[in-house]
Image: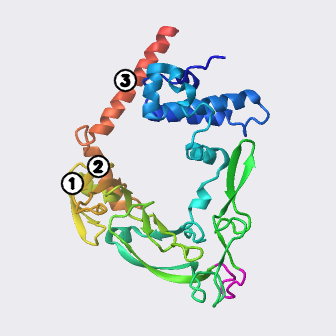
Amino acid sequence: MSKRDYYEVLGVTRTCTEVELKGAFRKLAMQHHPDRNPGDSECEHKFRELNEAYEVLKDGDKRAAYDRFGHAAFEQGGGGGQHGFGADFASTFSDIFEDLFGMGGGGRRGGGRGTGRERGSDLRYNMEISLEEAFEGKEAQLRIPTSVTCEVCSGSGAKAGSKPKTCATCSGAGKVRHAQGFFTLERTCPSCHGRGQVIDDPCAACEGAGRVTRERMLSVNIPPGVEDGTRIRLAGEGEAGVRGGPAGDLYIFLSLQPHELYQRDGADLHCRVPIYMVTAALGGEVAVPAIDGSEAKVKVPAGTQTGGRFRLPGKGMPVLRSKQTGDLYVQVAVETPQKLTKRQRELLAEFDKLSSEATQPESSGFLSRVKAFLGGLGNQNSNTD
């Protein structure tokens, strides 16, 4: 039976790149893997065929020879891949095994063969700060319960005077092998749980864990300009590692409290300021508090309407790790007087008699459009009748 073209087997073109070749191989190998298709002889055959093709095409020299001579280049034992498994079979499929079975990651996190050392877990701390603190920055003190290295056994987990012993089950490898079909698979050692060591006489203070729970005080610097959701990383301030392994990291997630005056948009601040009707009509100045504690003056021109917006440059938030500063935008809302006295009512009534379209252009224009609209509807109804 003649062999299929290797490029056809992998479903790629002859001009494919190494990345495209590996991607096609991984996809098909996972699809036809015997462990995913137990008892399926056709899938087993396709899996061997895929491996043979990939073993040749992934090697630059072999691929060049195959492109020139085809399968004849590897007859008489020249290819080294006819039997489906090359010398580097385990390394070729290590990443595929991780995808299929979730293996390979846990054993590598330790500190090496026979050490039993594992990196500690990362920790998360949620901190809420005010907008003023985000503007100025602050030095915060945190009280965090976490795992620290046991001082009695110095993190070894063994009683004073004794030491952890090499695991007899895995000989310190942290992993054990067993055959499954024509594969030899590795799994975490059940005796030492991947550490490669066992403790016969554990430390009484930490019960063999090598670490104990304590509450620690940490100082963290919050720089000016942080935003909601900013993450600060404190390297090595997470949980202590197992058996003297390196500590994890501490991640501080910041959230900003709502402010009674300002709405934040990046480095800019927005503030809604009510103003007197008279000020809006005649013009004047309005005092506005800035986030830095100073008082800014906004000049309101005569005839200002609700929704008018004024920009105060440089009165916003600092940009994180920059010398730039945002702006403060003031949006005015004209306030209608309430609880008027008799005299105030008389004055407003007199003002109304003296008003014209020139003094109320928007209102007058709107009323004119309404009358025109209603008049148009009346004409339509007359024509319909």
Q: Quadrant of residue 328?
A: bottom left
Secondary structure of the residue carrying numbered label 1: helix
Mark 2 vs mark 3: which is more N-terminal? Answer: 2
Residue topped by disc 1: 282
Q: Residues within 10 Å of mark 1 (few under 14, many from 20)?
A: few
The residue where tag 2 is placed is: 308
Q: Which tag, 2 or 1, sits closer to the chain's start?
A: 1
In the displayed orientation, state which residue is furthest to the right: 39
Q: Is residue 89 magenta?
A: no
Amino acid on which disc 2 is placed: Gly
Check the image and tell me how it is coloured. Answer: rainbow
Q: What's the mark number on residue 15?
A: none
Amino acid at dot 1: Leu
Q: CA distance from mark 2 to mark 1?
A: 15 Å
Cα separation between marks 2 and 3: 29 Å
**Residue 372 — which label?**
3
Q: Residue 282: x percent and y percent? A: 21, 54
Regarding mark 2 in the picture, which secondary structure is present there? loop
Residue nearer the viewer, 330 or 43: 43
Residue positioned 28% across, 66% down in the render = 290
Query: At x 53% / y 27%, what residue is drawn?
Result: 74
Q: Residues within 10 Å of mark 3 (few under 14, many from 20)?
A: few
Instruction: State yes or no: residue 204 in magenta.
Output: yes
Instruction: Identify the amino acid type marked 3.
Output: Ala
344 relative to 243 in the view: left or right: left
Q: Secondary structure at mark 3?
A: helix
Residue placed at 59% from the left, 19% from the top?
Answer: 4
First to last magenta residue range: 200-209
In this picture, is 124 found above or below 353?
A: below
What is the x, y in percent for residue 192? 70, 69
Q: Residue at x 58, y 72 (%)?
A: 115
